[in-house]
Image (cartoon, grey):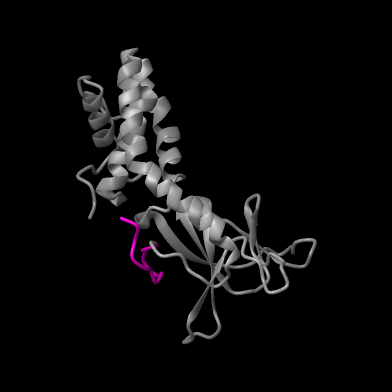
Protein backbone atom coordinates (compact mmCIF):
# COMPACT_ATOMS: atom_id res chain seq x y z
CA UNK A 1 0.00 0.00 0.00
CA UNK A 2 1.42 3.36 -1.05
CA UNK A 3 1.47 6.45 1.12
CA UNK A 4 -0.75 9.46 0.41
CA UNK A 5 2.25 11.52 -0.73
CA UNK A 6 2.75 11.65 -4.49
CA UNK A 7 5.55 14.24 -4.70
CA UNK A 8 8.51 15.37 -2.63
CA UNK A 9 6.65 18.63 -2.07
CA UNK A 10 3.88 16.65 -0.34
CA UNK A 11 6.50 15.11 1.92
CA UNK A 12 8.17 18.47 2.56
CA UNK A 13 4.88 20.03 3.60
CA UNK A 14 4.21 17.16 5.99
CA UNK A 15 7.69 17.71 7.44
CA UNK A 16 6.80 21.37 7.97
CA UNK A 17 3.55 20.31 9.65
CA UNK A 18 5.59 18.15 12.06
CA UNK A 19 7.72 21.21 12.80
CA UNK A 20 4.75 23.54 13.30
CA UNK A 21 5.67 25.59 10.23
CA UNK A 22 3.46 26.83 7.36
CA UNK A 23 3.47 24.86 4.14
CA UNK A 24 5.54 25.86 1.11
CA UNK A 25 3.80 28.00 -1.47
CA UNK A 26 5.77 26.43 -4.32
CA UNK A 27 7.58 23.26 -5.33
CA UNK A 28 10.36 21.96 -3.09
CA UNK A 29 12.73 21.73 -6.07
CA UNK A 30 12.34 25.39 -7.02
CA UNK A 31 11.25 27.19 -3.84
CA UNK A 32 13.56 30.19 -3.35
CA UNK A 33 12.60 31.02 0.26
CA UNK A 34 15.10 30.34 3.04
CA UNK A 35 12.72 27.72 4.37
CA UNK A 36 12.61 25.96 1.01
CA UNK A 37 16.39 26.09 0.63
CA UNK A 38 16.92 24.71 4.13
CA UNK A 39 14.51 21.85 3.52
CA UNK A 40 16.15 21.09 0.18
CA UNK A 41 19.63 20.87 1.76
CA UNK A 42 18.43 18.21 4.18
CA UNK A 43 16.19 16.36 1.72
CA UNK A 44 18.45 13.88 -0.09
CA UNK A 45 20.72 13.11 2.88
CA UNK A 46 17.66 12.40 5.03
CA UNK A 47 15.96 10.20 2.43
CA UNK A 48 19.09 8.20 1.66
CA UNK A 49 19.92 7.75 5.35
CA UNK A 50 16.50 6.15 5.93
CA UNK A 51 16.62 3.96 2.85
CA UNK A 52 20.09 2.75 3.81
CA UNK A 53 18.93 1.67 7.29
CA UNK A 54 16.72 -1.22 6.27
CA UNK A 55 15.77 -3.47 3.35
CA UNK A 56 12.42 -1.77 2.73
CA UNK A 57 10.29 -4.27 0.81
CA UNK A 58 9.17 -1.79 -1.85
CA UNK A 59 12.78 -0.86 -2.63
CA UNK A 60 14.19 -4.38 -2.97
CA UNK A 61 14.90 -5.02 -6.63
CA UNK A 62 16.41 -7.84 -8.68
CA UNK A 63 18.32 -7.06 -11.87
CA UNK A 64 20.07 -9.42 -14.28
CA UNK A 65 23.64 -8.23 -14.71
CA UNK A 66 26.47 -9.07 -17.08
CA UNK A 67 30.06 -9.31 -15.86
CA UNK A 68 32.54 -6.55 -16.56
CA UNK A 69 35.03 -7.22 -19.36
CA UNK A 70 37.87 -7.22 -16.84
CA UNK A 71 37.90 -9.88 -14.14
CA UNK A 72 39.07 -9.44 -10.56
CA UNK A 73 42.73 -10.23 -9.92
CA UNK A 74 41.71 -13.52 -8.28
CA UNK A 75 39.74 -14.60 -11.35
CA UNK A 76 36.23 -13.90 -10.10
CA UNK A 77 33.73 -12.07 -12.27
CA UNK A 78 33.10 -8.40 -11.54
CA UNK A 79 29.53 -7.14 -11.70
CA UNK A 80 29.05 -3.38 -11.65
CA UNK A 81 26.40 -2.38 -9.13
CA UNK A 82 23.41 -0.47 -10.57
CA UNK A 83 23.61 3.29 -10.19
CA UNK A 84 20.52 3.33 -7.97
CA UNK A 85 21.93 0.69 -5.59
CA UNK A 86 22.14 1.76 -1.96
CA UNK A 87 23.41 -1.60 -0.74
CA UNK A 88 23.48 -5.13 -2.21
CA UNK A 89 21.66 -7.93 -0.44
CA UNK A 90 22.65 -10.99 -2.42
CA UNK A 91 22.78 -12.80 -5.73
CA UNK A 92 20.48 -15.16 -7.57
CA UNK A 93 21.56 -17.71 -10.15
CA UNK A 94 19.29 -19.88 -12.29
CA UNK A 95 20.76 -23.22 -13.26
CA UNK A 96 18.48 -23.38 -16.32
CA UNK A 97 15.77 -21.20 -17.81
CA UNK A 98 13.11 -23.35 -16.14
CA UNK A 99 15.15 -24.30 -13.10
CA UNK A 100 14.87 -23.03 -9.53
CA UNK A 101 16.65 -19.92 -8.36
CA UNK A 102 19.50 -20.34 -5.90
CA UNK A 103 20.03 -17.57 -3.38
CA UNK A 104 23.55 -16.56 -2.32
CA UNK A 105 24.22 -14.03 0.40
CA UNK A 106 26.82 -11.36 -0.18
CA UNK A 107 29.73 -12.33 2.05
CA UNK A 108 28.68 -15.98 2.43
CA UNK A 109 31.52 -18.49 2.81
CA UNK A 110 31.67 -21.69 0.78
CA UNK A 111 32.46 -25.18 2.08
CA UNK A 112 36.19 -24.38 1.95
CA UNK A 113 35.76 -21.24 4.04
CA UNK A 114 36.29 -18.79 1.20
CA UNK A 115 33.98 -15.93 0.25
CA UNK A 116 32.69 -16.45 -3.29
CA UNK A 117 30.52 -13.35 -3.57
CA UNK A 118 31.25 -10.00 -1.97
CA UNK A 119 31.00 -6.27 -2.57
CA UNK A 120 34.13 -4.33 -3.44
CA UNK A 121 33.71 -0.65 -4.25
CA UNK A 122 31.12 -0.27 -7.01
CA UNK A 123 31.33 -3.95 -7.94
CA UNK A 124 30.04 -7.29 -6.76
CA UNK A 125 32.56 -10.08 -7.13
CA UNK A 126 31.08 -13.43 -8.12
CA UNK A 127 32.38 -16.90 -8.89
CA UNK A 128 29.60 -17.60 -11.41
CA UNK A 129 28.39 -16.06 -14.64
CA UNK A 130 24.76 -15.23 -15.38
CA UNK A 131 23.61 -13.71 -12.11
CA UNK A 132 20.94 -11.35 -10.88
CA UNK A 133 21.87 -8.92 -8.13
CA UNK A 134 19.26 -8.29 -5.45
CA UNK A 135 19.67 -4.89 -3.86
CA UNK A 136 17.98 -2.00 -2.11
CA UNK A 137 17.54 0.78 -4.60
CA UNK A 138 17.39 4.53 -4.04
CA UNK A 139 13.98 6.09 -4.57
CA UNK A 140 13.08 9.78 -4.65
CA UNK A 141 9.54 8.98 -5.75
CA UNK A 142 7.11 9.07 -2.77
CA UNK A 143 4.53 7.30 -4.91
CA UNK A 144 6.62 4.16 -4.46
CA UNK A 145 6.90 4.42 -0.68
CA UNK A 146 4.82 2.48 1.83
CA UNK A 147 3.20 4.41 4.69
CA UNK A 148 5.95 3.10 7.00
CA UNK A 149 8.74 4.34 4.77
CA UNK A 150 6.97 7.67 4.28
CA UNK A 151 6.66 8.20 8.04
CA UNK A 152 10.28 7.22 8.64
CA UNK A 153 11.53 9.68 6.02
CA UNK A 154 9.27 12.46 7.30
CA UNK A 155 10.46 12.02 10.88
CA UNK A 156 14.12 11.88 9.89
CA UNK A 157 13.84 14.84 7.52
CA UNK A 158 12.05 16.84 10.23
CA UNK A 159 14.74 15.95 12.78
CA UNK A 160 17.55 16.92 10.39
CA UNK A 161 15.94 20.24 9.42
CA UNK A 162 14.52 21.19 12.81
CA UNK A 163 17.44 23.17 14.21
CA UNK A 164 17.75 25.22 11.02
CA UNK A 165 14.03 25.97 10.77
CA UNK A 166 12.95 26.16 14.41
CA UNK A 167 16.17 26.50 16.44
CA UNK A 168 14.46 24.22 18.95
CA UNK A 169 16.50 21.26 20.16
CA UNK A 170 13.46 19.74 21.85
CA UNK A 171 11.57 19.56 18.56
CA UNK A 172 14.59 18.05 16.82
CA UNK A 173 15.00 15.50 19.59
CA UNK A 174 11.31 14.53 19.55
CA UNK A 175 11.27 13.89 15.81
CA UNK A 176 14.50 11.86 16.02
CA UNK A 177 12.98 9.77 18.82
CA UNK A 178 9.94 9.07 16.65
CA UNK A 179 12.22 8.11 13.79
CA UNK A 180 14.34 5.78 15.89
CA UNK A 181 11.30 4.14 17.48
CA UNK A 182 10.01 3.31 14.00
CA UNK A 183 13.26 2.30 12.32
CA UNK A 184 15.66 0.89 14.92
CA UNK A 185 13.90 -2.49 15.30
CA UNK A 186 14.12 -2.82 11.52
CA UNK A 187 17.78 -1.85 11.29
CA UNK A 188 18.53 -4.39 14.03
CA UNK A 189 16.92 -6.98 11.76
CA UNK A 190 19.24 -5.89 8.95
CA UNK A 191 22.25 -6.27 11.26
CA UNK A 192 21.06 -9.76 12.14
CA UNK A 193 20.89 -10.54 8.42
CA UNK A 194 24.45 -9.30 7.98
CA UNK A 195 25.69 -11.46 10.85
CA UNK A 196 23.97 -14.48 9.31
CA UNK A 197 25.57 -13.92 5.91
CA UNK A 198 27.93 -16.81 6.48
CA UNK A 199 25.13 -19.25 5.81
CA UNK A 200 25.05 -19.69 2.04
CA UNK A 201 21.98 -20.41 -0.08
CA UNK A 202 19.54 -19.02 2.47
CA UNK A 203 17.44 -16.16 1.20
CA UNK A 204 16.46 -13.97 4.16
CA UNK A 205 12.74 -13.64 4.81
CA UNK A 206 11.18 -10.23 4.55
CA UNK A 207 12.10 -9.31 0.98
CA UNK A 208 9.12 -8.68 -1.25
CA UNK A 209 9.62 -7.24 -4.70
CA UNK A 210 8.59 -7.68 -8.33
CA UNK A 211 10.44 -10.57 -9.91
CA UNK A 212 11.81 -11.96 -6.64
CA UNK A 213 10.28 -14.69 -4.54
CA UNK A 214 9.86 -13.21 -1.12
CA UNK A 215 9.04 -14.50 2.31
CA UNK A 216 7.01 -12.90 5.01
CA UNK A 217 8.32 -9.49 6.01
CA UNK A 218 9.31 -8.42 9.50
CA UNK A 219 6.39 -5.97 9.69
Quadrant including the C terminus: bottom left
Quadrant hosting residue 177:
top left
Name the foreground residue: 119 vs 171.
171
Q: Residue at x 75, y 61 (%)?
A: 72
Left or right, 99 with reference to 108: left
Q: Residue at x 54, y 73 (%)?
A: 201
Quadrant hosting residue 155:
top left
Whether residue 166 is visible here, answered yes or no, is yes
Q: What is the x, y in percent for residue 163?
A: 37, 17
Q: Is residue 141 above or below residue 32?
A: below
Q: Is residue 109 above or below residue 56?
A: below
Number of on-image labels: 0
In magenta, the rendered stretch is 207-219
Left or right, 161 with reference to 130: left
Q: Residue furthest right?
A: 73
Q: What is the x, y in percent for residue 41?
A: 42, 25
Q: Residue at x 41, y 27 (%)?
A: 42
Whether residue 138 is visible here, answered yes or no, is no
Quadrant hosting residue 131:
bottom right
Q: Magenta span has 30?
A: no
- What is the chief secondary structure element of the magenta stretch? loop
Quadrant including the N terminus: bottom left
Name the foreground residue: 191 vs 80.
191
Name the foreground residue: 55 vs 41.
55
Q: What is the x, y in percent for residue 214?
A: 38, 68
Q: What is the x, y in percent for residue 96?
A: 53, 86
Left or right, 85 with reference to 4: right
Q: Magenta span has 211?
A: yes
Amino acid sequence: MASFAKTLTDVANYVLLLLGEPALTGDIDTDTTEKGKSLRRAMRPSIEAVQDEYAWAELVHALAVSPDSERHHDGRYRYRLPEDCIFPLGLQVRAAMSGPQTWMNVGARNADGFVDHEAEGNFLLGALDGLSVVYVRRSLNPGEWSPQLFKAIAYRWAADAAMILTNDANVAGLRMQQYEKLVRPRSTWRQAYSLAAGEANQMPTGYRSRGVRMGRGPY
